[in-house]
Image (cartoon, rainbow, N blue to C red):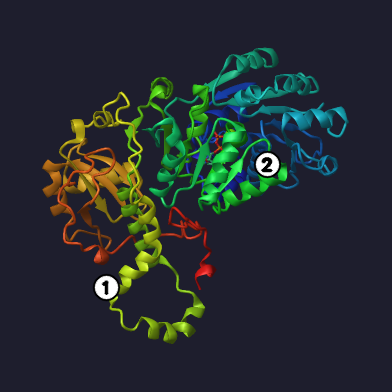
Amino acid sequence: MTKFEALGLQQSLLDAVADMGFETPSEVQEKAIPILLESETDLVALAQTGTGKTAAFGFPLIQKIDANSRTTQGLILSPTRELCLQITKEMQAYSKYEKNINVVAIYGGASITEQARQIKRGAQVVVATPGRMKDMIGRRLVDISKIDYCILDEADEMLNMGFFEDIKDILSNTPDEKSTWLFSATMPKEVSIIARKFMHSPQEITVGAKNSGASTVQHEFYTVGGRDRYPALKRLADANPDIFSVVFCRTKRDTQRVAEKLIEDGYNAGALHGDLSQNQRDLVMNSFRKKQIQMLVATDVAARGIDVDDITHVINYQLPDEIETYTHRSGRTGRAGKSGISMVIVTRSEMRKIQAIERKIQQKFISKKIPTGPEICEIQLYHLANKIKDTQIADDVDSYLPAINEVLKEIDRDELIKKIVSVEFTRFSNYYNKSKDLNTVSNGRDNDSRKGERGNYGGGNGSVRYFINVGEKDGYDWMSLKDFIRDTAGLGREDIFKVDVKDSFSFFNSESATTDQILSTFTEFKVDGRFVNVEVSKNPGGGGRRGGGGGGRDRGRKRDKAGYGKRRGDRGGNRNSASNSGKRRSKKRSDFF
Ligand code: ADP
Ligand code: MG
């Protein structure tokens, strides 16, 4: 018996669970589902974003709906249109094996007549934003006077957005005997007021602050001068060629401005904020979901609750005013057990905020340095080599080959490789050639002595940076790669640090005392028949020694033989990662051939 079965869900829902690929229930699901199935009760459930709240109320709701009746029996209120659509889609997926269950979304900015028509056809479950719901009740286009279940999803955010009055109005149109289920990431005063006023002795469940979703997020901050925020953002993007991120700004204006600049500079970026038309927002969200946009620049409100998988980085271009908001932002990544990184660009005067957030999230930030030009160039070079290796050869290339061969016939293999790489790379290295260090000298924190893992590598003086030819494509994240290196080389807990996992390669640091041990372990070392190769990186990187020799330099320059990251799955294949800066251009493959 799997654990989902133990919760009391009927077979048709278990089949849907299996189709969705859920194996074990999350904590909030494990706690909420049995309660909701077994009793008619009000419920307050507190759990962070990314903990699977939708399924926690969605499955019980569907099991309790009477499919033979067309009456609207369940109402789900959610703060934004995007979230409303997302919940609707999830509910439809959960109920795919149910007969005759209709879930209809009601939200602003789309045809009210069409939505009314869908309701009229019989919607047992309505998912709505408060504004449009109130509107439709007023026009008698929807009847919620007989609902049995009312769900307030992301209640804290709905109240943050000023929907208190609307919610009150809506609830006054519902029967007293219904059950109300309130789901929220946090419990500010307004939420407890709602709970007190509109709920009858609700049962309460709280999922610990350290839920699996959140603990897989690494929090990092980068201290820069106030005017260097934008160049710093660019470098963070350039140092992570396969980045798939949400960049948070404080105001709509900044959001628009940063997105425009990024696009101008050739990044695959888009803006999401409230001043855009619904149509524009839909377009942006669709491109983002398809990963055509790598950097979604967004306001907090617009991005709230959006559940896009595989977001690798959340970048706080500016810190939010409310600490609470930070948890919502960083909750966009590290979802469903995956790991993620939340980066904060701060000025020195904002250090106090970092400490306040640390207290709130009960996790330490790692102080990181904005990558230098040479570091970025190194990363981009490896990335480029991998890209060439992984590129599928276009069908129609063959017919041009004789002519191409003729042009290139004088050039030997080594030289040809250098030239191919230079085509893309020169632009890049030109851009970063004389770039300055963006890091402010001191941020009041000793960088290397507090890295979450609290290494004994104080000051980082003996620290050596390494390159390793495995990365995310091989299924590693910073935690598992660290474990792998440590265990393989027989090192201690604190010996490996500053692990930066890229798509098909990674970097890490160790004290120089362990360098021999590491290099000898990873000589001729194979996993699954493939060489795993470690070399000392040219750039000390990651806040360690800068400008110094950086340890052993290039060991033997064997990299072109190194057996770069074997491609697993097709991640990144559609990510259109135009990997050059300065004049980064988004090129489709067809532009090349
Ligand atoms: P929340 O509302 O708490 O922020 P969601 O309901 O949006 O979280 O779920 C976050 C992600 O986790 C979604 O992609 C969802 O499909 C996935 N998910 C939910 N429950 C499970 C589970 N039991 N196993 C695996 N993935 C899950
Ligand atoms: Mg949710």
From this view, report whether residue 429 is shown above or below residue 253.
Answer: below
Please state if 326 lies on the left or on the right of 347 as rendered.
right
Residue 85 disc label: 2
Determine whether the beta carbon of the residue marked 1 sits less than 8 angstroms from the nearest atom of ligand 1. Answer: no
> Quick one: SS at disc 2?
helix
From this view, report whether residue 17 is shown above or below residue 161.
Answer: below
Q: Position of residue 75 (x, y in %)?
A: 73, 31
From this view, report whether residue 78 is shown above or below residue 547.
Answer: above
Discs 2/1, front: 1
Of the residues shown, which amino acid type is indicated by label 2? Answer: Leu
Please state if 455 lies on the left or on the right of 180 as rendered.
left
Please state if 291 lies on the left or on the right of 535 as rendered.
right
Viewer-closest of 196 and 562: 562
Q: Quadrant of residue 255?
A: top right
Q: Quadrant of residue 65?
A: top right
Instruction: Estimate how packed mark 2 is, as few (under 14), some (14 to 19) or many (20 or more) residues with alpha carbons within 10 Å.
Output: many
Residue sitting at x 61%, y 28%:
154
Q: Position of residue 344 (x, y in %)?
A: 43, 33
Whether residue 354 is visible here, answered yes or no, is no
- Give the residue at mark 1: 414
Of the residues shown, which amino acid type is indicated by label 1? Answer: Asp
Residue sitting at x 43%, y 53%:
581
